[in-house]
Image (spheres, rainbow, N blue to C red):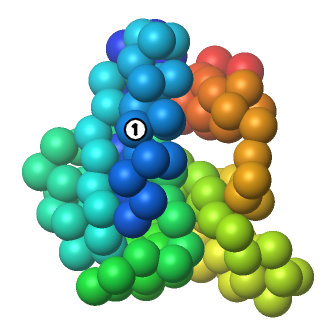
Amino acid sequence: MNGAKARVLICDDDPLLLELMEFRLRAKGYEVITAVDGAEALVKAEQDGPDIVVLDAMMPKADGLEVLARIKASPVLSEIPVIMLTARKAERDIVSALEKGADDYLVKPFIPEELLARLARLIARRNGKR
């Protein structure tokens, strides 16, 4: 699979941000799946088998760190790279996410092209390319 056909699950409770990210990712050829809360994110991760997940830390029903921990604890989902995209920028938040298995961490406000570059890098690494 090449990066242009990768499935990205974006989980954020901000509808405007979701719409912006979905637009940018589709324009780059990604297939986009969206979720507005942690519970929906887990269901869609299990049902849709994304190639990568972008998670907000602060979401209703289950926060992003809980979702991250459950993804990484799942034998089926654990190999899926996860990028945390959140307004939380305290050192303890970043370290906690990385310790729970986050593959990358990006703080809002963010540069959309930086997110795209990080996605492409993680997808290529998962597919065995450097």
Q: Is residue 105 left or right of residue 51?
A: right
Where's residue 120, x and y in %?
Answer: 62, 25
Residue sitting at 72 percent across and 58 percent down? 108
- Which of the 4 image quadrants contains residue 75? bottom left
Q: Mark 1 = which residue?
A: 19
Q: Residue at x 74, y 83 (%)?
A: 93
Query: Which residue is rendered at x = 51% and y = 78% of the image?
Result: 58
Residue 127 in view (yes/no): no
Residue 21 at least partly seen: yes
Query: Does 49 sit above or below residue 77?
Result: above
Q: SS at mark 1?
A: helix
Q: Which quadrant: the C terminus? A: top right
Where does the image place residue 23, in percent across and percent down from the top left? 43, 24
Q: Where is residue 42, by image quadrant?
A: bottom left
State the quadrant of the N terminus: top left
Q: Disc count in the image? A: 1
Residue at 55% in and 74% down: 57
The image position of residue 5, as x and y in percent, is: 37, 14
Amino acid at dot 1: Glu
